[in-house]
Amino acid sequence: MKYVTLGDSDLRVSAACLGGAGFGTQATDEPTFHQLDKFFELGGTFVDSANMYSWWVKTAGAGCSESSLGRWMKARGNRDKVVVATKMGMPHPAFAGSAMNAPTAAVEKGLRRAQIIEECDKSLRRLQTDHIDLYYTHADDRTTPIEETMAGFEVVVRTGKVRQIAVSNFAAWRIAQSNAVARTRAFPRYVAVQQHQTYLRPNPGIDWLHNLPGSEELTDFCKSERVTIVAYSPLLMGGYDRPERRWGVGWLPSPDRERAYGGPDADARLATLESVAKEIGVTNSQLVLAWMVNSTPPVVPLFGASSDAQLAMNMAAIDIKLMPEQMARLNK
């Protein structure tokens, strides 16, 4: 397994991140524990959650992902070996959830100083830990002054509750503004951005709701400012290897879901992807992950897995070495 350092921080993580949106949504913790065990057996260390996962599962509710992850770390006694990332700031309703998960009060969207401190403390209790390694804003809040948001993160970092901070679903210029304020005030800066990013390029005119896609502008910004990109939904729900599922963007309403990707640009990129994948004997999905990890600087793919075999295939992709000529063809 390859490992990378996030931005200019001291936080070193596996080059693949396991997404926790499904943690704790089953009748017992066993499926979550099994997946986490397999991920760590394969060399993974970087695990992603959020305070609102998984509010859409009414038998589980918001906070169930963090709670299940916390129970796993306690059961395994491995907190010092896990790089825990979680997020706050995305609105979500409250569900009572099952007996396995404590109810969570409804949370409004926002990045106010008091919100950051309060939600951090709630996450720490659910995770059963005294610190979060990487704490994300889950969505931008343009109604709260940047100075107030960064002041909130300064408190949780200064008090040792958070090691590093990051953003998700932010425009490049908003990250630049925030880090400029942080430099001026000697506050902690964002070291990573978690964005929806994949090999295909999104079509224009799509309402992405809270979930912003990556862009060439964001990539250029992150290269110059040493901010690491963590790519969520990199495999488009399996669409690279299953034509009947192209192109899956589960959170978008119709018709944007069906037209977010596709067209001549997508056809050309997919043809190149398939050609290189055949050359080196891997699946299209594996090549997408390998392309990210072999980029300069590396992009960290964040994925889930529905089976041990799928997880093993995804993890094997992280160690694929692509030649400069192959990267050039894929990028072109």
Image (cartoon, rainbow, N blue to C red):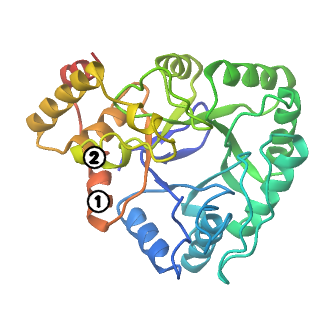
> Does residue 32 appear in the picture of this structure?
yes
Secondary structure under the numbered disc 1 in the rendered image: helix
Secondary structure under the numbered disc 2 in the rendered image: helix
Residue occupying the far front of the picture: 255
Badge 2: how crowded within 10 Å, few (<14), some, or many (20+)?
many
Q: Residue at x 81, y 59 (%)?
A: 121
In the rendered view, would you say 144 is above or below 18? above
Q: Residue at x 87, y 27 (%)?
A: 145
Residue 136 x %, y %: 67, 43
Residue 310 numbered tag: 1
Q: Is residue 168 left or right of residue 255?
A: right
Task: Look at mark 2 in the image and give the residue it sits on.
Answer: 317
> Does residue 130 appear in the picture of this structure?
no
Q: Amino acid at mark 2?
A: Ala
Mark nearer the N terminus (1 vs 2): 1
Q: Residue 95: which quarter of the image?
A: bottom right
Along the viewing direction, whichever of 74 and 258 lies nearer the viewer: 258
Residue 101 x %, y %: 68, 76
Badge 1: how crowded within 10 Å, few (<14), some, or many (20+)?
few
Along the viewing direction, whichever of 257 and 137 lies nearer the viewer: 257
- Specify the quadrant that holds the C terminus: top left
Give the Cα distance between marks 1 and 2. 11 Å
Q: Amino acid at mark 1?
A: Gln
Q: Residue at x 43, y 71 (%)?
A: 37
